[in-house]
C-alpha cells in the first residue's frame, strides 16, 4: 500500500489574513515598474486624450501609474495641468459663443490644443519631457 504524501509544513509568510481580496492592499505586493515602451504608450495616450476627453485621460493615467514610474508621473502631471487649463478655456469660449467672440475663439482654442498635444505626444514617443508653452501649473 502506498502512502499519500504529506503537504509541506505551512510557513508564516504563506498565510494571508485577507483571503478573497485579490491582492489589493496586501503589504509587499507593490506592482512592478513600467517598461520604457509602456511609459511611452501611456504618456502618448495621456497627451492625445486631452482634446477629446479634457482632463479625464491624464487624470486616470496619473492616478493609475504615478507609483510605477517617476517619468510618467512627471509627464502625466504636466498633461493634467494643461488639460485643466484647456477644459477651462474650452468652457469659457463655449459660453462666449453667446456674444459672438466665442465663435472665433472656440476653434482657435481647439486648434492650439491639438497642436500642443501632438507635439507633446511626439516628445513622449522620444521618451522626452515636454513642457506645454502655455500652461498653468496647478499641480506639482
Image (cartoon, helix red, strand yellow):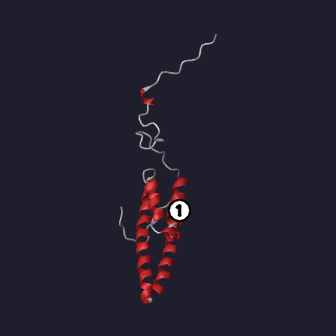
Residue highlighted by disc 1: 45
Q: Secondary structure at mark 1?
A: helix
Q: Position of residue 82 (x, y in %)?
A: 42, 69
Name which quarter of the figure residue 24 lies in: top left
Answer above or below: position of 8 versus 57.
Answer: above
| Residue furthest to the bottom | 100
Answer above or below: position of 125 versus 96.
Answer: above
Judge whether residue 133 can be spotted in this image: no
Say how many tags the image has: 1
Answer above or below: position of 17 versus 99.
Answer: above
Q: Position of residue 104 (x, y in %)?
A: 47, 86
| Quadrant in which the C terminus appears | bottom left
Q: Please name whichever residue, 112 or 92, is drawn nearer the observer in this view of the structure.
A: 92
The local crowd at label 1, few if under 14, some if 14 to 19, many if 20 or more residues have their Cα within 10 Å, is some
Residue at the image position 42 percent from the left and 89 percent from the top: 99
Residue at the image position 46 percent from the left and 41 percent from the top: 23
Locate residue 70 relative to residue 8 in the image: left or right.
left
Q: Position of residue 43 (x, y in %)?
A: 50, 60
Q: Please name whichever residue, 77 or 127, is drawn nearer the observer in this view of the structure.
A: 77
| Residue furthest to the top | 1
Q: Position of residue 57 (x, y in %)?
A: 48, 63
| Quadrant in which the N terminus appears | top right
Judge whether residue 36 can be spotted in this image: yes
Answer above or below: position of 104 versus 51.
Answer: below
Residue at the image position 42 percent from the left and 77 percent from the top: 91
Residue at the image position 40 percent from the left and 74 percent from the top: 88
Amino acid at each position: 500500500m502506498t502512502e499519500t504524501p504529506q503537504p509541506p509544513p505551512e510557513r508564516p509568510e504563506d498565510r494571508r489574513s485577507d483571503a478573497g481580496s485579490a491582492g489589493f492592499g496586501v503589504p509587499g505586493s507593490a506592482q512592478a515598474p513600467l517598461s520604457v515602451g509602456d511609459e511611452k504608450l501611456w504618456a502618448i495616450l495621456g497627451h492625445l486624450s486631452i482634446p477629446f476627453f479634457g482632463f479625464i485621460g491624464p487624470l486616470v493615467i496619473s492616478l493609475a501609474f504615478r507609483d510605477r514610474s517617476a517619468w510618467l508621473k512627471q509627464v502625466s502631471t504636466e498633461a493634467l495641468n494643461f488639460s485643466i487649463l484647456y477644459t477651462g478655456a474650452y468652457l469659457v469660449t463655449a459660453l462666449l459663443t453667446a456674444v459672438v467672440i466665442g465663435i472665433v475663439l472656440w476653434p482657435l482654442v481647439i486648434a492650439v490644443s491639438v497642436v500642443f498635444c501632438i507635439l507633446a505626444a511626439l516628445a513622449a514617443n522620444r521618451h522626452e519631457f515636454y513642457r506645454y508653452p502655455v500652461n498653468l501649473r496647478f499641480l506639482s
